[in-house]
Image (spheres, rainbow, N blue to C red):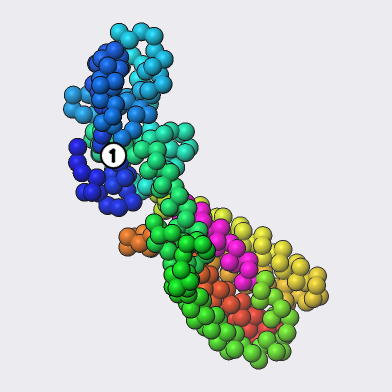
Amino acid sequence: MESTTEYPIKTAGYNMVNDVPVFNEDNMLADIEKALEDSAHQFTTLDYIYLTEEDNTLVGVISIKNLMACGDKSLKARDIMIRDMVTTDVTNDQENVVYLALSHGLKSIPVVNEEKGFMGVVPYDTILQIFNHEVQSDVFNFGGIFHRVGDEYTTIHSSALHMIRSRLPWLIIGVIGGTLAASLIAQFEELLSSFIALASFIPVMVYMSDAAGAQTEALIIRSMALESHLNVRKYLAREVVVATTLAAVSGLFAAFLAYMTRQSLILGVIIFLALFLSIIASVTINTFAPIILKKFNYDPALATGPLATIFSDIATLAIYLAVAMTLLRGA
């Protein structure tokens, strides 16, 4: 078997171990049990026994529990092995391994190559470590904190300098983004002063587009993590339908509330069109950002949090004010 260090970090191949019990499907259960008694200390994990053919093709698996429970030890391994196995490719993302283990209730996941040859196993303790690190990393990314997985980050053990260095970069970027948004609004001061109701709906516009974008972002990043060969075209086709529906319903509801509270039909029309376009823009930004990052071998989760919020907010404000100016000029 190959060395795990030959595979890219954060893949199944990188996280697998090779020292696991492997036998031929023709071996008798009595022989397997005797071999395990003699060499159990040599294995990293003993949750399952993996069965292969002569060419090392993985054909089945037997849990230790089922082996011990079998009363007839004269049977061959193939007689009680599970043929319909859950496996993962050596190049699959480690998040996909965690998903497979949790969704199927398995303690370890066998790793195979393109020819279905048995390469090793991602053990239970490694799966738990990956799960902890990935959740931790995603939480920090959503919160806008630069954090290297593996470093401790707690209010008790981290130094003040470390916490400042982790949190300050995105805050600085946020200030820059906020300044750009303020500059954009300043270009429409005359419009806002002549129709003050527009200003009161800016928070609504920004919140709605951010919320729709965040939902899209979370779903596509999860899909990309769990499906190593995600059909992007099919996913985008579905997202177009979803985004259009969400934008239309949200826009109509917001327009209705705007009309009821301000008794202004033109304001309702502005709110509808602007929110419709803003939600579509936000969903588009938050859909393509992770895809582009993954295309260039960057972590798609980097598209989350403050970075996506800045682009979404600026796009929303630009659309809102441009729609308002266009419609009010023609009114």
Residue 216 position, x and y percent, is: 53, 58
The amino acid pointed to by label 1 is Val
Q: Which residues are magenta?
A: 205-223
Quadrant of the image containing the N terminus: top left
**Relative to residue 186, is residue 281 depicted above or below?**
above
Q: Is residue 218 visible?
A: yes
Nearest to the observer: residue 168 or residue 307? 168
**Relative to residue 288, is residue 181 depicted above or below?**
below
In percent of the image, x 23 and y 49: which residue is there? 5
Residue 220 painted magenta? yes
Residue 257 position, x and y percent, is: 76, 68
Residue 53 painted magenta? no
**Relative to residue 244, is residue 196 depicted above or below?**
below
Residue denoted by label 1: 17
The reply, left or right, for residue 276 in relation to residue 62 is right
What residue occupies the far bottom of the structure in this picture? 190
**Relative to residue 253, is residue 52 depicted above or below?**
above
